Image (cartoon, rainbow, N blue to C red):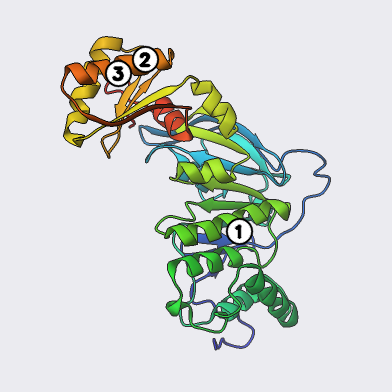
Amino acid sequence: MIHAPRGAIATPFASRTAAGSMERRGVMTVAVRPPEDAGEQPAVRVVGLTKSFGEVTALRDITFDVARGAILGILGPNGAGKSTLVSTLGTLITPDSGTAVIAGHDLLSDAAGVRASISMTGQYAALDETLGGRDNLIFFGRMQGLRRQSAQTRADYLLDRFGLVAAGRRPVDTYSGGMRRRLDIACGLVVKPEVVFLDEPTTGLDPRSRQAVWSLVAALRNDGITTLLTTQYLDEADQLADNIIVIDHGRIVAEGTAAELKEKVGGTYCEAVPADASGAPALRDLLVARFGTDHRCTVSDTGTVTLTAPDRVDTMGQVIDIAREARIELLDVGLRSPSLDDVFLTLTADPHTGGSR
């Protein structure tokens, strides 16, 4: 139990801001004040957002919309500007130019209104580990103005919704990583936000825990909550996102559904797997020499050589012939359609090396 001076609210890991928001380590959770006359406007509208740090431009003329209740996937290599974008939209960083309207509130003229309509959850759970999950949820409810009975009722609902009833009274320091992440997200929903920012919510989780978080993110859509999801897992964006933006060097280089982005890359790919992975670079060099730069050719960490194959079977036949002539034994060779990985690698390729930055 946390004890506080009379008239004060105990806050071992949170602090109130003048706008009435609550900031935690890596997480900002705030109460909801629905905007007036929001109409049919998108939940998030970003126009010309630009931000520089000294000589480094982190965001360059970022513009996009997110429909109400939709999930936007934000992809990009490390240092692309994803975290800066989320921090800016969460009012933690002030842009140099451009603006955004979030849940009907202008980012620049009504930052308090923005904070009152969003929840931000970082990669690392920021919870009081000495308390149980239920007490953490009640604590956040009380911090956001709920009466004790209402906070308890909401906590019990979220424990059930997030599959944490059995562990609800156990100290959080006994929770697994996946349980902590689910509880952390639940804390951001004690008072239902209109927009949720999830910054790589499944980083470091095992496959089973990732699947559990995926189910929770999908459920946000069913509840009408708009979600902006940054992730390093392309299959996560493919599985969850209604729309995806790809950011590289602070710019949006592509936007669309997963299917649209795959179609934009287009074509068919030939994959060849040498019996000896050390032979993959040599095979790649031979294919580049034969097909030139018109055919993108890459080697994965596991030694799979991938080549764009506009001529499909004919291209695959030539790959087999080249490998045979070079005495490179192949374990497998085949054709496949483009994946979101191909989209990512193509759109964020280093023009000097042909590889992803």
Is residue 136 left or right of 40 when viewed as pictured? left
Which amino acid, mark 1?
Leu
The relative height of residue 110 versus residue 159 in the rendered view (above or below) is: above
In-image side of 313 versus 89 (left or right): left
Badge 3 marks a residue whose secondary structure is helix
Mark number for residue 315?
A: 2
Q: Residue at x 54, y 52 (%)?
A: 198
Choose mark 2 or mark 1, whichever is in front. Answer: 2
Res. 319 mark: 3
Classify the position of the C terminus by image quarter: top left
For the residue labelled by badge 1, is the local secondary structure a helix, a strand or a loop? Answer: helix
Determine whether the residue tagged by mark 2 lies in a helix, strand or loop.
helix
Q: Is residue 100 left or right of residue 13?
A: right
> Residue 213 appears in which quarter of the rendering?
bottom right
- Cα separation, mark 2 vs mark 1, equals 43 Å
Please give the residue where the numbered disc 1 appears in the rendered image. Answer: 216
What is the spatial separation of the Cα atoms under label 3 and label 2, in whole angstroms? 6 Å
